[in-house]
Amino acid sequence: MADNGSSDSSTNATVTPPSFNPPEMKSWADVADEEAAAENQDEASSADIKLDSLVIDESKQGALGLTNPDDSTIESVTSGDTPYTSAKRFEDLNLSPELLKGLYVEMKFEQPSKIQAISLPMILTPPYKNLIAQAHNGSGKTTCFVLGMLSRVDPKVPEPQALCICPTRELAIQNMEVLLKMGKFTGITSELALPPDQANYIPIQKRPPITAQVIIGTPGTLSKWLQHKKLGLSKMKILVFDEADHMLAMSGFRDESIRIMKAITKSSSNCQVLLFSATFDDAVKAFASRIVGEIFLKEYNQMFVKKEELSLESVKQYKVRCPDEHSKIMVIKDQILELGEKVGQTIVFVKSRNTASMLHQALVELGYEVTTIQGALNIEDRDKIIKEFKEGLTQVLISTDVLARGFDQSQVNLVINFDLPVQYGHFSEPDYEVYLHRVGRAGRFGRKGAVFNLLCLDSDDMIMGKIEKYFNSQITEVGPWNSRAEFEGALRGAGLL
DNA sequence: AAAAAAC
């Protein structure tokens, strides 16, 4: 990728946003369609973007004023002439004393992680360029953008100045918890933009305009607030997309995200945008770069990780061949539930809400205590189940992909793929991004962990094979499926027993 | 043979 010999890649790492005049008088749907069409065009003739040729390797970072010898897997590209120096200590970042206190006292951080060291100077140095940032699961991305939001907000201005958009309710709440903790001494105000539970319901018309300085929420509620003119955007200084690849993917939240982006650029001319995720497939990467360049008409910096280097080394991946669907349930019962308690908490991922209910019921009938979360539950139940799991009151959580991304619980050491993640409409194709995100629920911040992929059909074997090849990751077979000793060995091999 | 997210 970095060593493709492209003539200008080593000396000139400038990214020039393609010029673009946004169509003004069209509906959002029209605009989104045009963008989709334009993207297809890009794929046909990608000569004008050439992202890959612009990605430089570590040995060349020094020339850009960016050095981090420890970091062998994050490649960064800076645009323009702004020099950035990797931050070895939080003191290097010109943060307020209140914010530093939050980092050290509340968060108990000692020094920036790799992605923080590289990305924070890019985020916090004027002229506050936009940033597309990829980094490993559990490597501290949340700290980057929460710190970014807290340090860019002016505590004296009682208006919304920072906005963070997330794909799920759970992720928004989790990010808010980090913000409250880190910003404890700053006096900065914040509010969640989420559908309220019954107890807190107030009709939108009766709500006063939002004055909180940092807003974190999901696209639906944010759109609703904007529609009812309850959320002013004129003072917005920083816009963050968490799980940005999903927020900009065609099958994700693309239209909503673009609508909000455009609303912000319309009323706030100089808003910085940050896109964070552990995954950016090539199509989304190109689209994200184009969108940031076109909508925000500003230079942007980027940092990416090669997909072969994205797997977490501390998390051991296994596969288990099961003779039929029922034996998959027996593996959960006889191996995972029996052994899992010794190694921490477990998340069992399933493909659908129906499978979640089926598995839940089967295990409860066998006398086990498990909880289940999926999007069809009511808000009160969702919040309660997450709260119990985060407090360690429950050991095993069955989940759809609602928790695949971002969910941060350090005690989760075991992830089970009861069903492998596949692409909707292409059921023989793995969803590589979802796979990687699920794996990333274990092994937070370098902790040890294990993943068991339960295979049953021939197609499962094929999908597993593709995943191994794509990430160049070693997935060891554990078997036979009903051998306790084999599972114990696997957990020992992962460093968990 | 899907999940997420607004009424």
Image (cartoon, helix red, strand yellow):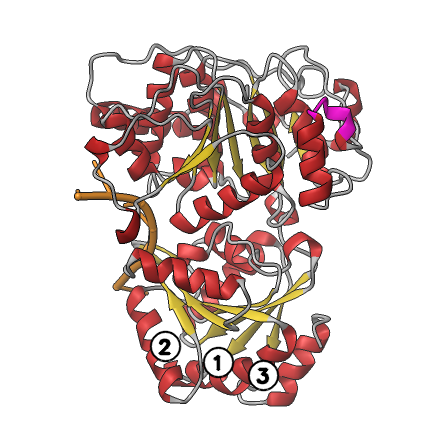
Q: Both on one chain, marks 2 and 3?
A: yes
- Of the numbered discs in the image, which one, if any, rests on residue A479? 3
Q: Secondary structure at mark 2?
A: helix
- Along the polypeptide, which appears first: circle 1 or circle 3? 1
Q: Tell me the residue that label 2 is attached to.
A: A359
Q: Identity of the amino acid at label 1?
A: Ile
- Of the numbered discs in the image, which one, if any, rests on residue A332? 1
- At 21% from the left and 24% from the top, the residue drawn is A30
- Along the polypeptide, which appears first: circle 2 or circle 3? 2
Chain under numbered label 2: A
Q: Which residues are magenta?
A: A91-96
Q: Position of residue A372 (x, y in %)?
A: 39, 69
Q: Are marks 1 and 2 in contact (CB under 8 Å)?
A: yes
Q: Position of residue A415 (x, y in %)?
A: 54, 67
Q: Is residue A317 visible?
A: yes
Label 1 and label 3: CA atoms lie apart by 14 Å
